[in-house]
Protein backbone atom coordinates (compact mmCIF):
# COMPACT_ATOMS: atom_id res chain seq x y z
CA UNK A 1 0.00 0.00 0.00
CA UNK A 2 2.69 2.49 0.99
CA UNK A 3 4.92 1.68 -1.95
CA UNK A 4 2.03 2.16 -4.37
CA UNK A 5 0.91 5.51 -2.94
CA UNK A 6 4.55 6.66 -2.97
CA UNK A 7 5.02 5.74 -6.62
CA UNK A 8 1.67 7.31 -7.51
CA UNK A 9 2.51 10.59 -5.77
CA UNK A 10 5.93 10.77 -7.40
CA UNK A 11 4.61 10.04 -10.89
CA UNK A 12 1.78 12.55 -10.44
CA UNK A 13 4.21 15.26 -9.36
CA UNK A 14 6.36 14.53 -12.41
CA UNK A 15 3.48 14.73 -14.85
CA UNK A 16 3.48 10.98 -15.56
CA UNK A 17 -0.29 10.81 -15.31
CA UNK A 18 -0.84 7.34 -16.73
CA UNK A 19 1.71 5.79 -14.39
CA UNK A 20 0.27 7.76 -11.49
CA UNK A 21 -3.22 6.50 -12.24
CA UNK A 22 -2.06 2.89 -12.39
CA UNK A 23 -0.23 3.27 -9.08
CA UNK A 24 -3.22 4.90 -7.37
CA UNK A 25 -5.37 1.95 -8.44
CA UNK A 26 -2.73 -0.38 -7.02
CA UNK A 27 -2.85 1.60 -3.77
CA UNK A 28 -6.62 1.14 -3.69
CA UNK A 29 -6.26 -2.61 -4.16
CA UNK A 30 -3.63 -2.85 -1.44
CA UNK A 31 -5.60 -0.75 1.05
CA UNK A 32 -8.67 -2.95 0.64
CA UNK A 33 -6.74 -5.85 2.19
CA UNK A 34 -4.76 -3.80 4.72
CA UNK A 35 -6.29 -3.78 8.19
CA UNK A 36 -4.16 -0.89 9.47
CA UNK A 37 -5.93 2.31 10.60
CA UNK A 38 -4.31 4.22 7.73
CA UNK A 39 -5.91 2.13 4.97
CA UNK A 40 -9.14 4.20 4.65
CA UNK A 41 -7.07 7.40 4.42
CA UNK A 42 -4.81 5.99 1.70
CA UNK A 43 -7.86 4.73 -0.21
CA UNK A 44 -9.71 8.05 0.05
CA UNK A 45 -6.69 10.05 -1.09
CA UNK A 46 -6.17 7.61 -3.97
CA UNK A 47 -9.75 7.98 -5.19
CA UNK A 48 -9.53 11.77 -4.97
CA UNK A 49 -6.36 11.77 -7.07
CA UNK A 50 -7.86 9.36 -9.60
CA UNK A 51 -10.81 11.68 -10.12
CA UNK A 52 -8.42 14.58 -10.67
CA UNK A 53 -6.58 12.50 -13.27
CA UNK A 54 -9.72 11.74 -15.29
CA UNK A 55 -9.10 14.73 -17.55
CA UNK A 56 -5.51 13.67 -18.23
CA UNK A 57 -5.96 9.91 -18.72
CA UNK A 58 -8.60 8.99 -21.33
CA UNK A 59 -11.06 6.24 -20.37
CA UNK A 60 -9.44 5.93 -16.95
CA UNK A 61 -12.32 4.06 -15.33
CA UNK A 62 -12.71 1.74 -18.32
CA UNK A 63 -9.00 0.84 -18.19
CA UNK A 64 -9.43 -0.37 -14.60
CA UNK A 65 -13.12 -1.27 -14.65
CA UNK A 66 -12.71 -4.88 -13.54
CA UNK A 67 -10.59 -3.90 -10.54
CA UNK A 68 -12.75 -0.93 -9.51
CA UNK A 69 -16.03 -2.82 -9.90
CA UNK A 70 -14.60 -5.66 -7.83
CA UNK A 71 -13.59 -3.20 -5.09
CA UNK A 72 -17.09 -1.74 -5.06
CA UNK A 73 -18.55 -5.20 -4.56
CA UNK A 74 -16.02 -6.22 -1.90
CA UNK A 75 -14.42 -3.05 -0.49
CA UNK A 76 -12.72 -4.68 2.48
CA UNK A 77 -10.88 -1.93 4.38
CA UNK A 78 -11.30 0.89 1.84
CA UNK A 79 -13.50 2.89 4.19
CA UNK A 80 -16.87 4.42 3.46
CA UNK A 81 -15.58 7.73 2.04
CA UNK A 82 -13.51 6.00 -0.65
CA UNK A 83 -16.37 3.66 -1.54
CA UNK A 84 -18.87 6.54 -1.74
CA UNK A 85 -16.65 8.49 -4.11
CA UNK A 86 -15.96 5.40 -6.19
CA UNK A 87 -19.71 4.91 -6.54
CA UNK A 88 -20.15 8.49 -7.69
CA UNK A 89 -17.33 8.08 -10.19
CA UNK A 90 -18.85 4.87 -11.51
CA UNK A 91 -22.22 6.60 -11.88
CA UNK A 92 -20.68 9.46 -13.85
CA UNK A 93 -18.68 7.14 -16.12
CA UNK A 94 -21.33 4.48 -16.56
CA UNK A 95 -24.24 6.59 -17.73
CA UNK A 96 -22.92 7.04 -21.27
CA UNK A 97 -22.46 3.28 -21.68
CA UNK A 98 -25.61 2.09 -19.94
CA UNK A 99 -28.24 0.15 -21.85
CA UNK A 100 -30.86 0.91 -19.21
CA UNK A 101 -33.49 3.61 -19.46
CA UNK A 102 -32.96 6.80 -17.49
CA UNK A 103 -35.36 5.76 -14.73
CA UNK A 104 -33.86 2.27 -14.43
CA UNK A 105 -30.35 3.69 -14.33
CA UNK A 106 -31.35 6.22 -11.67
CA UNK A 107 -32.90 3.45 -9.58
CA UNK A 108 -29.68 1.43 -9.84
CA UNK A 109 -27.63 4.42 -8.66
CA UNK A 110 -29.93 4.93 -5.66
CA UNK A 111 -29.71 1.22 -4.80
CA UNK A 112 -25.92 1.14 -5.02
CA UNK A 113 -25.32 4.32 -3.04
CA UNK A 114 -27.77 3.58 -0.21
CA UNK A 115 -29.68 6.83 -0.69
CA UNK A 116 -33.00 7.58 0.93
CA UNK A 117 -35.62 7.78 -1.79
CA UNK A 118 -38.02 9.90 0.26
CA UNK A 119 -36.82 12.98 2.15
CA UNK A 120 -38.91 15.70 3.74
CA UNK A 121 -37.63 19.25 4.13
CA UNK A 122 -38.87 22.02 6.41
CA UNK A 123 -37.84 25.64 6.95
CA UNK A 124 -36.50 28.24 6.90
CA UNK A 125 -35.98 28.78 10.63
CA UNK A 126 -34.14 31.65 12.27
CA UNK A 127 -33.70 35.08 10.79
CA UNK A 128 -30.62 34.65 8.62
CA UNK A 129 -28.17 35.43 11.41
CA UNK A 130 -24.68 33.99 11.53
CA UNK A 131 -25.43 31.98 14.67
CA UNK A 132 -28.70 30.44 13.51
CA UNK A 133 -27.06 27.11 12.74
CA UNK A 134 -26.11 26.71 16.42
CA UNK A 135 -29.67 27.15 17.69
CA UNK A 136 -32.39 24.56 18.28
CA UNK A 137 -35.74 24.85 16.53
CA UNK A 138 -39.12 23.07 16.94
CA UNK A 139 -38.59 20.35 14.28
CA UNK A 140 -36.00 18.77 16.58
CA UNK A 141 -38.71 17.75 19.01
CA UNK A 142 -39.96 14.13 18.94
CA UNK A 143 -43.07 13.32 16.96
CA UNK A 144 -44.62 14.34 13.62
CA UNK A 145 -44.12 17.81 12.19
CA UNK A 146 -47.07 20.16 11.80
CA UNK A 147 -47.61 21.67 8.36
CA UNK A 148 -46.19 25.00 9.60
CA UNK A 149 -44.68 26.68 12.66
CA UNK A 150 -45.08 30.18 14.11
CA UNK A 151 -43.52 32.97 12.07
CA UNK A 152 -40.11 34.28 13.00
CA UNK A 153 -40.72 37.58 14.84
CA UNK A 154 -37.77 39.36 13.17
CA UNK A 155 -38.71 38.77 9.53
CA UNK A 156 -42.25 37.36 9.58
CA UNK A 157 -41.56 34.36 7.35
CA UNK A 158 -43.54 31.22 8.21
CA UNK A 159 -41.40 28.05 8.42
CA UNK A 160 -43.29 25.14 6.87
CA UNK A 161 -42.95 21.70 5.32
CA UNK A 162 -41.60 22.35 1.84
CA UNK A 163 -42.60 20.92 -1.48
CA UNK A 164 -39.67 18.76 -2.61
CA UNK A 165 -38.42 17.31 -5.87
CA UNK A 166 -35.94 14.45 -5.60
CA UNK A 167 -33.66 13.20 -8.35
CA UNK A 168 -31.58 10.16 -7.44
CA UNK A 169 -30.13 11.03 -4.03
CA UNK A 170 -30.66 14.77 -3.95
CA UNK A 171 -33.84 16.30 -2.52
CA UNK A 172 -34.36 19.98 -3.41
CA UNK A 173 -37.14 22.34 -2.37
CA UNK A 174 -39.02 23.36 -5.49
CA UNK A 175 -40.24 26.63 -4.03
CA UNK A 176 -38.36 29.84 -3.40
CA UNK A 177 -37.17 30.17 0.20
CA UNK A 178 -35.23 32.68 2.26
CA UNK A 179 -31.90 31.95 3.91
CA UNK A 180 -31.98 30.19 7.23
CA UNK A 181 -31.84 26.79 8.88
CA UNK A 182 -33.66 23.81 7.38
CA UNK A 183 -34.43 20.30 8.54
CA UNK A 184 -34.33 17.05 6.57
CA UNK A 185 -36.23 13.96 7.70
CA UNK A 186 -36.40 10.38 6.50
CA UNK A 187 -37.12 6.93 7.97
CA UNK A 188 -35.69 3.45 7.48
CA UNK A 189 -36.61 -0.03 8.67
CA UNK A 190 -34.01 -2.48 9.93
CA UNK A 191 -35.16 -6.11 10.25
CA UNK A 192 -32.53 -6.78 12.91
CA UNK A 193 -30.05 -5.06 15.19
CA UNK A 194 -27.12 -3.90 13.09
CA UNK A 195 -24.31 -1.41 12.62
CA UNK A 196 -24.78 1.35 10.07
CA UNK A 197 -23.15 4.50 8.77
CA UNK A 198 -25.57 7.38 8.30
CA UNK A 199 -24.45 10.41 6.27
CA UNK A 200 -26.48 13.55 5.56
CA UNK A 201 -25.06 16.06 3.09
CA UNK A 202 -24.41 19.49 4.58
CA UNK A 203 -25.69 18.59 8.05
CA UNK A 204 -24.45 20.45 11.13
CA UNK A 205 -26.35 18.09 13.44
CA UNK A 206 -27.92 14.64 13.00
CA UNK A 207 -30.34 12.75 15.23
CA UNK A 208 -31.48 9.14 15.01
CA UNK A 209 -34.67 8.37 16.92
CA UNK A 210 -34.40 11.81 18.58
CA UNK A 211 -30.91 11.02 19.92
CA UNK A 212 -28.02 13.26 18.74
CA UNK A 213 -25.39 11.20 16.91
CA UNK A 214 -23.32 13.86 15.07
CA UNK A 215 -22.52 17.55 15.45
CA UNK A 216 -20.15 19.78 13.55
CA UNK A 217 -19.80 23.52 13.06
CA UNK A 218 -17.60 25.98 11.25
CA UNK A 219 -16.39 27.36 14.58
CA UNK A 220 -15.46 23.85 15.77
CA UNK A 221 -11.98 23.56 14.28
CA UNK A 222 -11.49 20.47 12.14
CA UNK A 223 -15.04 19.18 12.57
CA UNK A 224 -16.31 19.71 9.03
CA UNK A 225 -14.85 16.42 7.82
CA UNK A 226 -17.25 14.55 10.17
CA UNK A 227 -19.63 13.65 7.39
CA UNK A 228 -20.86 10.23 8.52
CA UNK A 229 -21.73 8.72 11.88
CA UNK A 230 -21.29 5.07 12.86
CA UNK A 231 -24.15 3.71 14.96
CA UNK A 232 -25.74 0.49 16.15
CA UNK A 233 -29.54 0.47 15.95
CA UNK A 234 -32.06 -2.12 17.17
CA UNK A 235 -34.55 -3.84 14.89
CA UNK A 236 -37.47 -1.66 13.88
CA UNK A 237 -38.31 1.63 12.20
CA UNK A 238 -35.99 4.57 12.76
CA UNK A 239 -36.14 8.32 12.21
CA UNK A 240 -33.26 10.31 10.72
CA UNK A 241 -33.38 14.04 11.34
CA UNK A 242 -30.74 16.55 10.28
CA UNK A 243 -30.22 20.29 10.66
CA UNK A 244 -28.90 21.64 7.34
CA UNK A 245 -28.02 25.10 6.06
CA UNK A 246 -29.92 25.07 2.76
CA UNK A 247 -33.08 23.58 1.31
CA UNK A 248 -31.09 20.72 -0.26
CA UNK A 249 -30.27 17.37 1.31
CA UNK A 250 -29.26 13.81 0.61
CA UNK A 251 -29.36 10.96 3.14
CA UNK A 252 -27.36 7.74 2.88
CA UNK A 253 -27.69 4.63 5.01
CA UNK A 254 -24.71 2.32 4.53
CA UNK A 255 -23.03 -0.75 5.88
CA UNK A 256 -19.81 -0.04 7.85
CA UNK A 257 -17.74 -0.96 4.78
CA UNK A 258 -19.46 1.73 2.70
CA UNK A 259 -21.74 -0.50 0.64
CA UNK A 260 -25.47 0.15 0.56
CA UNK A 261 -27.38 -1.18 3.56
CA UNK A 262 -30.28 -2.06 1.24
CA UNK A 263 -32.94 -1.08 3.77
CA UNK A 264 -36.52 -0.03 3.08
CA UNK A 265 -36.89 3.75 3.46
CA UNK A 266 -39.86 6.11 3.51
CA UNK A 267 -40.97 9.57 4.62
CA UNK A 268 -44.27 8.78 6.34
CA UNK A 269 -44.34 10.86 9.55
CA UNK A 270 -47.47 9.18 10.92
CA UNK A 271 -45.98 5.71 11.42
CA UNK A 272 -44.30 5.00 14.79
CA UNK A 273 -40.54 4.73 15.12
CA UNK A 274 -38.21 3.25 17.71
CA UNK A 275 -37.73 4.99 21.04
CA UNK A 276 -34.61 2.95 21.88
CA UNK A 277 -31.58 5.24 21.54
CA UNK A 278 -28.94 4.14 19.03
CA UNK A 279 -25.41 3.55 20.26
CA UNK A 280 -22.74 5.74 18.68
CA UNK A 281 -19.65 3.70 17.74
CA UNK A 282 -16.15 4.59 16.54
CA UNK A 283 -15.88 7.54 14.17
CA UNK A 284 -15.78 6.28 10.55
CA UNK A 285 -14.31 9.41 8.95
CA UNK A 286 -10.71 8.83 7.76
CA UNK A 287 -9.06 11.96 9.16
CA UNK A 288 -11.13 12.55 12.29
CA UNK A 289 -8.63 11.02 14.71
CA UNK A 290 -5.81 13.01 13.11
CA UNK A 291 -7.66 16.34 13.25
CA UNK A 292 -8.67 15.73 16.86
CA UNK A 293 -5.04 15.06 17.71
CA UNK A 294 -3.97 18.26 15.96
CA UNK A 295 -6.75 20.23 17.68
CA UNK A 296 -5.42 19.03 21.03
CA UNK A 297 -2.04 20.56 20.22
CA UNK A 298 -0.25 17.24 19.75
CA UNK A 299 2.38 17.11 17.01
CA UNK A 300 0.99 14.19 15.01
CA UNK A 301 3.40 14.83 12.14
CA UNK A 302 6.43 14.03 14.28
CA UNK A 303 5.39 10.40 14.82
CA UNK A 304 3.51 9.81 11.56
CA UNK A 305 4.71 12.30 8.89
CA UNK A 306 3.36 10.39 5.88
CA UNK A 307 -0.12 10.01 7.35
CA UNK A 308 -0.05 13.71 8.29
CA UNK A 309 0.79 14.69 4.71
CA UNK A 310 -2.00 12.52 3.30
CA UNK A 311 -4.45 13.89 5.86
CA UNK A 312 -3.41 17.43 4.87
CA UNK A 313 -4.27 16.67 1.25
CA UNK A 314 -7.62 15.19 2.30
CA UNK A 315 -8.37 18.23 4.45
CA UNK A 316 -7.49 20.53 1.57
CA UNK A 317 -9.86 18.61 -0.71
CA UNK A 318 -12.59 19.14 1.92
CA UNK A 319 -11.90 22.91 1.80
CA UNK A 320 -10.32 22.83 5.27
CA UNK A 321 -7.10 24.60 4.35
CA UNK A 322 -6.56 25.77 7.93
CA UNK A 323 -6.41 22.13 9.02
CA UNK A 324 -4.21 21.23 6.06
CA UNK A 325 -1.73 23.99 6.91
CA UNK A 326 -1.64 22.98 10.55
CA UNK A 327 -0.83 19.40 9.60
CA UNK A 328 1.79 20.35 7.01
CA UNK A 329 3.67 23.05 8.92
CA UNK A 330 5.37 20.68 11.41
CA UNK A 331 6.68 18.65 8.48
CA UNK A 332 8.84 21.57 7.40
CA UNK A 333 10.70 21.21 10.70
CA UNK A 334 10.91 17.42 10.58
CA UNK A 335 14.47 16.09 11.02
CA UNK A 336 14.32 14.36 7.64
CA UNK A 337 13.95 17.72 5.88
CA UNK A 338 16.85 19.24 7.79
CA UNK A 339 19.41 16.63 6.77
CA UNK A 340 21.74 17.01 3.86
CA UNK A 341 21.16 15.19 0.61
CA UNK A 342 24.18 12.93 1.15
CA UNK A 343 22.98 11.78 4.56
CA UNK A 344 19.60 10.80 3.17
CA UNK A 345 20.18 9.46 -0.30
CA UNK A 346 23.10 7.42 -1.57
CA UNK A 347 24.29 8.17 -5.11
CA UNK A 348 23.10 4.74 -6.24
CA UNK A 349 19.54 5.78 -5.45
CA UNK A 350 19.83 9.17 -7.15
CA UNK A 351 21.05 7.38 -10.26
CA UNK A 352 17.86 5.34 -10.43
CA UNK A 353 14.92 6.38 -12.65
CA UNK A 354 12.84 9.06 -10.99
CA UNK A 355 9.78 6.86 -10.55
CA UNK A 356 11.86 4.34 -8.59
CA UNK A 357 13.32 6.77 -6.02
CA UNK A 358 11.14 5.51 -3.16
CA UNK A 359 12.78 3.81 -0.25
CA UNK A 360 13.13 3.60 3.51
CA UNK A 361 16.80 4.38 3.93
CA UNK A 362 18.23 3.39 7.33
CA UNK A 363 19.83 6.81 7.76
CA UNK A 364 16.56 8.65 7.25
CA UNK A 365 15.29 7.78 10.71
CA UNK A 366 12.14 6.23 9.21
CA UNK A 367 11.21 2.58 9.35
CA UNK A 368 9.72 0.00 7.03
CA UNK A 369 7.70 0.46 3.89
CA UNK A 370 5.57 3.08 5.64
CA UNK A 371 8.46 5.51 5.52
CA UNK A 372 9.34 6.47 2.00
CA UNK A 373 11.02 9.51 0.52
CA UNK A 374 10.89 10.93 -2.97
CA UNK A 375 13.82 13.09 -4.00
CA UNK A 376 14.08 15.36 -7.04
CA UNK A 377 17.71 16.20 -7.69
CA UNK A 378 18.55 19.61 -9.12
CA UNK A 379 22.20 20.52 -9.01
CA UNK A 380 23.56 21.06 -5.54
CA UNK A 381 20.15 21.03 -3.83
CA UNK A 382 17.37 18.52 -3.38
CA UNK A 383 13.70 19.01 -2.66
CA UNK A 384 12.14 16.62 -0.18
CA UNK A 385 8.57 16.13 -1.30
CA UNK A 386 6.06 15.06 1.32
CA UNK A 387 2.94 16.22 -0.49
CA UNK A 388 2.13 17.90 -3.78
CA UNK A 389 -0.92 19.62 -2.36
CA UNK A 390 -1.79 21.73 -0.40
CA UNK A 391 1.73 23.23 -0.18
CA UNK A 392 1.16 26.62 -1.77
CA UNK A 393 3.17 29.77 -2.16
CA UNK A 394 3.22 31.68 1.09
CA UNK A 395 3.13 28.62 3.34
CA UNK A 396 5.81 27.99 5.95
CA UNK A 397 7.66 25.67 3.58
CA UNK A 398 11.33 26.35 2.72
CA UNK A 399 11.00 24.83 -0.76
CA UNK A 400 8.07 24.73 -3.12
CA UNK A 401 7.59 21.89 -5.59
CA UNK A 402 5.62 22.57 -8.75
CA UNK A 403 2.79 20.00 -8.87
CA UNK A 404 2.99 19.17 -12.57
CA UNK A 405 6.62 20.03 -13.32
CA UNK A 406 9.60 17.72 -12.93
CA UNK A 407 12.60 18.87 -10.87
CA UNK A 408 11.42 22.44 -10.34
CA UNK A 409 11.83 23.62 -6.75
CA UNK A 410 11.91 27.29 -5.92
CA UNK A 411 12.85 29.04 -2.68
CA UNK A 412 9.92 30.25 -0.64
CA UNK A 413 10.13 34.08 -0.59
CA UNK A 414 9.26 34.07 3.12
CA UNK A 415 12.58 32.33 3.93
Image: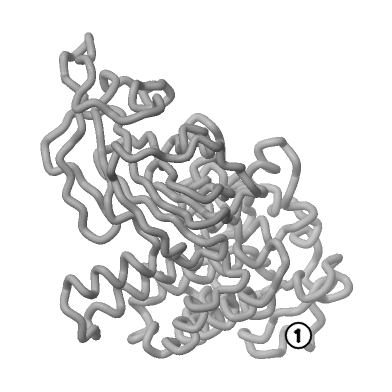
Crowding near the residue tagged with mark 1, few <14, some 14–19, many ≥20 C-alpha atoms within 10 Å: some
Screen quadrant of the N terminus: bottom right
Which residue is pictured at 75% across the width and 57% down the height? Answer: 304
- Across and down, in percent, residue 283 comes to 61, 49
Which residue is pictured at 75% across the width and 71% down the height? Answer: 370
- Helix, strand or loop under label 1: helix
Q: Is residue 379 visible?
A: no
- Across and down, in percent, residue 327 comes to 64, 49
Give left or right: position of 26 versus 251. right
Residue 382, quarter of the rendered image: bottom right
Residue 181, quarter of the rendered image: top left
| Residue at the extreme left | 175
- Across and down, in percent, residue 91 comes to 32, 73
Front-lying residue, 328 or 192: 192
- Across and down, in percent, residue 254 comes to 47, 59
Residue assigned mark 1: 349
Amino acid sequence: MWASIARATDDDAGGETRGAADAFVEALQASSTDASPSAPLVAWVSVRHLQELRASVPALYDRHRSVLDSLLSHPGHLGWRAVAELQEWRAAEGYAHSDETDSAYDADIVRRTGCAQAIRLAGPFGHGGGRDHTLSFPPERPGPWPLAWPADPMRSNVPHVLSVTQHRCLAIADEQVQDGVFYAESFFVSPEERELIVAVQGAVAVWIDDTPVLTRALEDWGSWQRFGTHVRVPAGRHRILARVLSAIASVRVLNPDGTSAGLAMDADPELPYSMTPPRVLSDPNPIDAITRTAAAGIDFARTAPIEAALAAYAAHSEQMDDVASDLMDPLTLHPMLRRSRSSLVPDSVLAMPRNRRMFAHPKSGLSGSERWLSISDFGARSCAQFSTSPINKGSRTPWLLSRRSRNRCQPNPKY
